[in-house]
Image (spheres, helix red, strand yellow):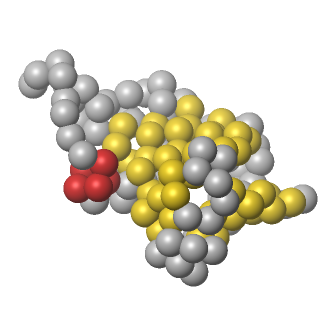
Amino acid sequence: MSEIYVGNADPDALADRGWLLGHFKPEGDPRHSTDVEIKWGRHPRGDRRAEWVRGEERTALLVLISGCFHMEFPERTVVLDKQGDYVVWPRGVDHSWFAAEESVVLTVRWPSVPGYAVR
C-alpha cells in the first residue's frame, strides 16, 4: 500500500463512524496508528450522544469547525460556538455531547486504544 493517503473527510468518515485515523484502520494503511485517533464529526441539530463515556482511558481534543456544540462534563458544560473554539480533557473525565446547531467538529484523542468500539 502507498505511504501517502489522500482523501476527503466526509466520505472517508462513513467507513468507521467518523474516525479517520487510529488503531482500527488496517495494518499498512497510512491511517493506521496506535498513537492517536482523529474523527471528523458531522452532527445534525439536536444530535446527542446516546450515553455518557465513563472511565475514559484517553486524552482528547475537540475543535469546532462550524455550528454550536456542547461538550458536557460532570461539573460543567462547555459551549463551543465560534469557529476554532476547542476543549481538551484528560484521561478519566466522563463526558457526553450535544449539537445545539448543525455542527462539524474534529476530535483528536490519544493513545489509540484497541478494545474500544468505534462509535
In the picture, the quarter occupied by the C terminus is bottom left
Q: Which residue is located at x 90 percent, y 59 percent?
A: 75
On the image, the x and y values in percent for residue 103 come to: 51, 65
- In the rendered image of this protein, does residue 70 appear above or below residue 85? below
Query: Splitting the image into 4 quarters, where does residue 117 fall?
Result: bottom left
On the image, the x and y values in percent for residue 89 come to: 73, 42
Residue toward you, 116 or 83: 83
On the image, the x and y values in percent for residue 55 come to: 71, 50
Task: Look at the image and tell me whether residue 15 can be seen.
Answer: no
In the picture, the quarter occupied by the N terminus is top left
Query: Splitting the image into 4 quarters, where does residue 24 fall?
Result: top left
Task: Look at the image and tell me whether residue 25 can be seen.
Answer: yes
Q: How many marks?
A: 0
Specify whether 103 is left or right of 4.
right
Residue lying furthest top: 3
Specify whether 15 is left or right of 83.
left
Query: Splitting the image into 4 quarters, where does residue 60 fall?
Result: top right
Q: Which residue is located at x 38 percent, y 55 percent?
A: 18
Specify whether 21 is left or right of 44.
left
- In the rendered image of this protein, does residue 93 appear above or below residue 31? below
Residue toward you, 3 or 86: 86
Q: Which residue is located at x 58 percent, y 50 percent?
A: 83
Q: Which residue is located at x 23 percent, y 56 percent?
A: 11
Residue lying furthest left: 1
Residue toward you, 80 or 4: 80
Residue lying furthest bottom: 46
Residue lying furthest front: 82
On the image, the x and y values in percent for residue 68 come to: 62, 65
- In the rendered image of this protein, does residue 27 appear above or below residue 103? above
- In the rendered image of this protein, does residue 65 appear above or below residue 77? above
